[in-house]
């Protein structure tokens, strides 16, 4: 896992809570507002790493958040539930 992926996973653990779930889209928006430097760092890294531009760069934080949530789920640090057709993430 890259350094940025580790940073994102650690930051998501701060944003997640056990009382209620959040969607990946909600967590991505929270990351943008609460950690704008990391959000920009994700876009810059993804643009360089995968030669992205425009829409691909703008969507890259959502991709990285989804990947980090999956890694947290596999490691047992986050759990997933479903409600009203949404996948919700909780801190374990």
Image: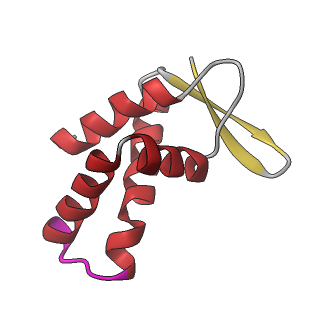
Rendered position, 72 above or below 38: above
Q: Is the magenta stretch mostly helix, strand or loop?
A: loop
Residue at 63% in and 45% down: 23
Residue at 44% in and 24% down: 14
- The quadrant holding residue 20 is top right
Please identify the residue farthest to the left as the structure is shown. 48
Residue 89 spot, x, y in % from top left:
61, 35
Residue 12 spot, x, y in % from top left:
44, 33
Quadrant (top left/top right/bottom left/bottom right) for the C terminus? top right
Indicate left or right for 22 with 52 as reference. right
Magenta residues span 49-54
Residue 51 spot, x, y in % from top left:
18, 77
Indicate left or right for 43 with 67 as reference. left
Residue at 64% in and 18% down: 18
For the rendered model, the colour scheme is secondary structure
Say if the magenta span includes residue 38.
Answer: no
Residue at 18% in and 59% down: 45
- The quadrant holding residue 21 is top right
């Amino acid at each position: 896992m890259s350094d940025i992926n580790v940073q994102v996973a650690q930051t998501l653990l701060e944003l997640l809570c056990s009382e209620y779930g959040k969607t990946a889209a909600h967590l991505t928006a929270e990351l943008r507002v609460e950690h704008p430097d990391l959000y920009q760092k994700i876009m810059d890294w993804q643009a360089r790493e995968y030669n992205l531009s425009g829409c691909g760069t703008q969507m890259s934080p959502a991709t990285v958040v989804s990947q980090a949530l999956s890694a947290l789920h596999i490691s047992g640090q986050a759990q997933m539930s479903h409600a009203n057709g949404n996948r919700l993430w909780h801190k374990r």
